[in-house]
Image: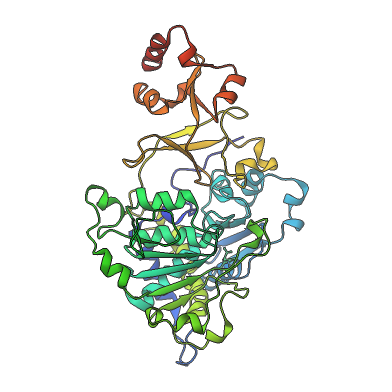
C-alpha cells in the first residue's frame, strides 16, 4: 500500500525539518514580500501581490477548526498569483465516510502542487507526508507541532529585537497541550534564546520536550530561586552560547546569574487547549495590565498565536508592547516565502536543494511489522486512529544521548518517548530488557529484532526471557553473528 515520495520532495512537519539557514532565508524572502502600509498608525503588514506562482495550486486539508492558518496560507498562495482548493470541514469530505489519511493524501496530491494539513492527532501530518509526492506542510497536528506558526513568532521577535540570541522569552499557559509552544521552544533553543516557562498548574512542558531541550539542545536548567529544579515549574532553560550541535562538545558558558536577573524580552501567551484535555475548568494565568506592570516586563513584547479566549486582556491591545496582531499579519508574507521556496518559484535554491545548516542527530530508525510489538504510548498519536491502524507501521527512532545511555524509543510520528520496553530476537525467540547491550552486540542491525512493551507482551507473542534460557551465551552470540 505504501507509495513513497520521491527523495527530493521536502515536507515541513516539524520546525526541525528546516535548517537555521533555511529559516533565515524564509525571513529574508518574507521581508521582500512585506507591504509597508503608508499609515504609520496601522502597523500591520500584509503580503505584496505578485505573479510568481501562476498555474500552481495549494490544497488545504483541515480536519480541525482554523481561521488564521488556513486563510493566511490561502491568501499567501493567491498573493503569489496561484490558486487554492480547500477541504476545511471533515464532515463534508471523504473522512466522514471513513477514508484513510493515506488515501485522501494520494488523491489530493494529483490536484495540487503543495498541501497544508491540520489534524487533531499527533503525528498525523508526518504520516500523511509519507504518501505524498508533493510537499506537505504541517498546519498543526494535535499537540505535537505547528512549525509555520513558529516562523511567524520568530519573525515577529526578530523584527522587534533584530536577533534572537540571548533573548529571554517567557511562555505562559498550556505548555503541555499547545503545539505552537513545542515548535517554538525548539527554535528558541536553536537560535540561542532563553526560555522561561510559566505554565498553568499541571500544564508544564511535556516530559519528552523538556528532556529534548536539556539533552539534545543542551539547555541548562537554572532555578529562579536557587534550587536545581529540573522539570519544575520554577525553572529557566538557559541556552548555551553555541546552541545545539556546535555545543555538543562544549558546555554552555553563560553567566546564569545574569540570565536570571535579565528582564524578560517577550511574553508568549497561549490559550487553554480545551480540546486536548478531559478536565474542563482549570486555574489559568491571565496576562493583563497589572501583570505587565512588573518592572521585568517593562520592555517585553506580548505575543499570542491567537485565538485568545480570556487569558489575554483586550485592554492591553493598545499597549505598544502588544504585537499579536502584527504576528498574525506576518503569516501571509512568511507563508508566501515558504511556499515559494518549497516550489522553487524564485531564482535561488529551492528548499529541496538548500544546504542544511542544521544537522539533526541521526538516530537509527526501527520499523515494526504491522500488528505486532510495541505501540506508541501516546494515545493521541495517529498510529492509534482506527482508520489508519490497518496500514500504519509503528516506527521509532532509537535515541541515545550521553545523558541517558539507555536507549529510548521515540515515535517517528508524534515524537513521544518510551523509556521501558524489551527487545526480542526474531529468530532465536528470546527477549531481554537489556536493549543497549543487545543493540551494541548486534551492531544495531535492527531487522533481526522486534520491540515489545514488556515481558508479558513478548511472552504472549511466543518469546522467552533470555535469562531463563538454557544457553543464554550462545544465543547472545547468535545476535552478534546474525
Ligand atoms: C494555534 C493552533 O491552532 O495551534 N492557532 C493558530 O494556528 N494560530 C493556537 C491555538 O489554537 O490556541
Which of 387 and 29 lies nearest the eye of the viewer? 387
On the image, the x and y values in percent for residue 195 come to: 39, 64
What quarter of the picture does the C terminus occupy? top left
397 vs 43: above or below: above
Q: Residue furthest top?
A: 470
Task: Say whether residue 387 is left or right of residue 265.
Answer: right
Task: Say whether residue 378 is left or right of residue 473.
Answer: right
Which quadrant of the render holds ligand 1?
A: bottom right
What quarter of the picture does the N terminus occupy? top right
On the image, the x and y values in percent for residue 234 come to: 42, 62
Residue 281 sits in quarter: bottom right
Which of 60 and 54 lies nearest the eye of the viewer? 60
Residue 347 visible within the image: no
Q: Residue at x 22, y 51 (%)?
A: 250
On the image, the x and y values in percent for residue 178 come to: 54, 61
On the image, the x and y values in percent for residue 20 come to: 34, 59
34 vs 190: above or below: below
Task: Say whether residue 7 is left or right of residue 179.
Answer: left
Q: Residue at x 45, y 69 (%)?
A: 153
Residue 313 sits in quarter: bottom right
440 vs 283: above or below: above
Amino acid at each position: 500500500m505504501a507509495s513513497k515520495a520521491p527523495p527530493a520532495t521536502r515536507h515541513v512537519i516539524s520546525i526541525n525539518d528546516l535548517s537555521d539557514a533555511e529559516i533565515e532565508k524564509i525571513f529574508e524572502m518574507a521581508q521582500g514580500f512585506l507591504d509597508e502600509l503608508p499609515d504609520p498608525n496601522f502597523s500591520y503588514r500584509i503580503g505584496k501581490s505578485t505573479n510568481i506562482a501562476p498555474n500552481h495550486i495549494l490544497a488545504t486539508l483541515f480536519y480541525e477548526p482554523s481561521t488564521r492558518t488556513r486563510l493566511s496560507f490561502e491568501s499567501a498562495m493567491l498573493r503569489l498569483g496561484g490558486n487554492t482548493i480547500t477541504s476545511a470541514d471533515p464532515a463534508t469530505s471523504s473522512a466522514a465516510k471513513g477514508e484513510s489519511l493515506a488515501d485522501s493524501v494520494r488523491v489530493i496530491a494529483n490536484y495540487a502542487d503543495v498541501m497544508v494539513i491540520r489534524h487533531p492527532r499527533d503525528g498525523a501530518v508526518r504520516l500523511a507526508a509519507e504518501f505524498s509526492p508533493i510537499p506537505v506542510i504541517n498546519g498543526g497536528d494535535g499537540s505535537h507541532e505547528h512549525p509555520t506558526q513558529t516562523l511567524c513568532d520568530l519573525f515577529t521577535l526578530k523584527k522587534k529585537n533584530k536577533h534572537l540570541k540571548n533573548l529571554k522569552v517567557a511562555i505562559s499557559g498550556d505548555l503541555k497541550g499547545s503545539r505552537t509552544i513545542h515548535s517554538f521552544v525548539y527554535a528558541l533553543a536553536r537560535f540561542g534564546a532563553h526560555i522561561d516557562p510559566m505554565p498553568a498548574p499541571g500544564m508544564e512542558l511535556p516530559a519528552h520536550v523538556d528532556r529534548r531541550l536539556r539533552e539534545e539542545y543542551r539547555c541548562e536548567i537554572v532555578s529562579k530561586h536557587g534550587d536545581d529544579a529540573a522539570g519544575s515549574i520554577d525553572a529557566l532553560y538557559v541556552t548555551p552560547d553555541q546552541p545545539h550541535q556546535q555545543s555538543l562538545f562544549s558546555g554552555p558558558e553563560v553567566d546564569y546569574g545574569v540570565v536570571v536577573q535579565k528582564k524578560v524580552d517577550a511574553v508568549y501567551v497561549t490559550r487553554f487547549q480545551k480540546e486536548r484535555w478531559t478536565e474542563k475548568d482549570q486555574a489559568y494565568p491571565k496576562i493583563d495590565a497589572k501583570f505587565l506592570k512588573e518592572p521585568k516586563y517593562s520592555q517585553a513584547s506580548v505575543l499570542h498565536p491567537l485565538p485568545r479566549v480570556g487569558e489575554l486582556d483586550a485592554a492591553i491591545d493598545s499597549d505598544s508592547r502588544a504585537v499579536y496582531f502584527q504576528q498574525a499579519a506576518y503569516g501571509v508574507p512568511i507563508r508566501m516565502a515558504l511556499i515559494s521556496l518549497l516550489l522553487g518559484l524564485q531564482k535561488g535554491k529551492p528548499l529541496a536543494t538548500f544546504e542544511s545548516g542544521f544537522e539533526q542527530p541521526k538516530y537509527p530508525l526501527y520499523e515494526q511489522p504491522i500488528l505486532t510489538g510495541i505501540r506508541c504510548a501516546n494515545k493521541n498519536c495517529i498510529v492509534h486512529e482506527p482508520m489508519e491502524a490497518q496500514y500504519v507501521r509503528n516506527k521509532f527512532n532509537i535515541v541515545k544521548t550521553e545523558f541517558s545511555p539507555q536507549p529510548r524509543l521515540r515515535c517517528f510520528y508524534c515524537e513521544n518517548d518510551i523509556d521501558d520496553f524489551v527487545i526480542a530476537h526474531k529468530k532465536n525467540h528470546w527477549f531481554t530488557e537489556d536493549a543497549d547491550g543487545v543493540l551494541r552486540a548486534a551492531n544495531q542491525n535492527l531487522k533481526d529484532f522486534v520491540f515489545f512493551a514488556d515481558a508479558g507482551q513478548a511472552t504472549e507473542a511466543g518469546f522467552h526471557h533470555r535469562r531463563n534460557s538454557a544457553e543464554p551465551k550462545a544465543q547472545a552470540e547468535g545476535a552478534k553473528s546474525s
